[in-house]
Image: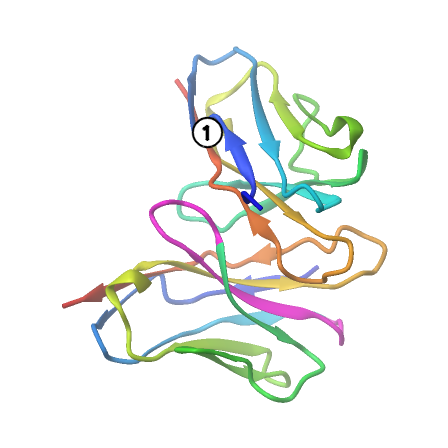
Amino acid sequence: DTGVSQNPRHKITKRGQNVTFRCDPISEHNRLYWYRQTLGQGPEFLTYFQNEAQLEKSRLLSDRFSAERPKGSFSTLEIQRTEQGDSAMYLCASRPRTANYGYTFGSGTRLTVV
Amino acid sequence: AQTVTQSQPEMSVQEAETVTLSCTYDTSENNYYLFWYKQPPSRQMILVIRQEAYKQQNATENRFSVNFQKAAKSFSLKISDSQLGDTAMYFCAFMIPNTGTASKLTFGTGTRLQVTL
């Protein structure tokens, strides 16, 4: 069990560019979550996958955001045409089917849009 | 909608002393979970302790314990014998389990705890 892995740890991009983040959950965890954390705030839910199906999306997830989880393994979060307001920490978490607790979080990807 | 409020943006405690972090929440649900997460400078969110709402007994994990007051919708975290490694952001979080939805976490804004010598 190597935990939840997120790459890259840091990303600096120019406004208008597209960026993609990757999350590798714990292998036996079928549930995967993306959260966004802005400075001085707690994480906010973005989207949720159960296996490969994206079952819930927050209103925070504008049409510039897209997430995938092909084959129910790793997940990617893409932001198109980045804006300065997208600057935040993007956290991935996973948990197993049977537990109503025990989210395991990754260390996050910090995005800075300049 | 559920809300979680942490009214203490920053707190400081001396090593070996005890500190209590406050959290209140608002919900109309009867079955839910409450959590305290720690986020050190390394950024990874680590689960400190959890409490099921149907349990009257307060949860305890080593030096960490909670005071869960369901009627008052209060969920405070007590850290005993504080250690330098406890320095971190602490987030209170709420979850409604297994309703066929995401069982997502709703977080408060956090309390920054500094443990000093």
Location of residue A89 with respect to B85 vertically, above or below: above
Circle 1 — which element?
loop
* Magenta region, main secondary structure: loop
Q: Nearer the viewer, residue B111 or A62?
A: B111
x and y percentages locating residue A24 in the rendered image: 61, 34
Location of residue B55 with respect to B41 vertically, above or below: below
Please give the name of the residue rendered at 60% of the width and 78% of the height, measured from the top-left corner.
B73
x and y percentages locating residue B107 in the rendered image: 55, 57
Q: Quadrant of residue A97?
A: bottom right
Q: Is residue A20 left or right of residue A89?
A: right
The residue at the far bottom in this view is B56
Q: Is residue A20 left or right of residue A114?
A: right
Q: Quadrant of the C terminus of chain B?
A: bottom left
Mark 1: few/some/many CA within 10 Å (<14, 14-19, 20+): many
User: Is residue B100 magenta-colored?
Assistant: no
Q: Is residue A37 left or right of residue A75?
A: left
Q: Quadrant of residue A20?
A: top right
x and y percentages locating residue A85 in the rendered image: 49, 28
- Residue where numbered disc 1 is placed: A87
Please give the name of the residue rendered at 30% of the width and 80% of the height, measured from the top-left corner.
B18
Q: Quadrant of the N terminus of chain B?
A: bottom right
Boundaries of the magenta span: B28-45
Please give the name of the residue rendered at 60% of the width and 32% of the height, measured from the top-left corner.
A23
Q: Quadrant of residue B70?
A: bottom right
Location of residue A75 with respect to B38 vertically, above or below: above
x and y percentages locating residue A62 in the rendered image: 67, 28
The residue at the far right in this view is B100
Amino acid, disc 1: Ser
Which chain is mark 1 on?
Answer: A
Q: Nearer the viewer, residue B100 or A28?
A: A28
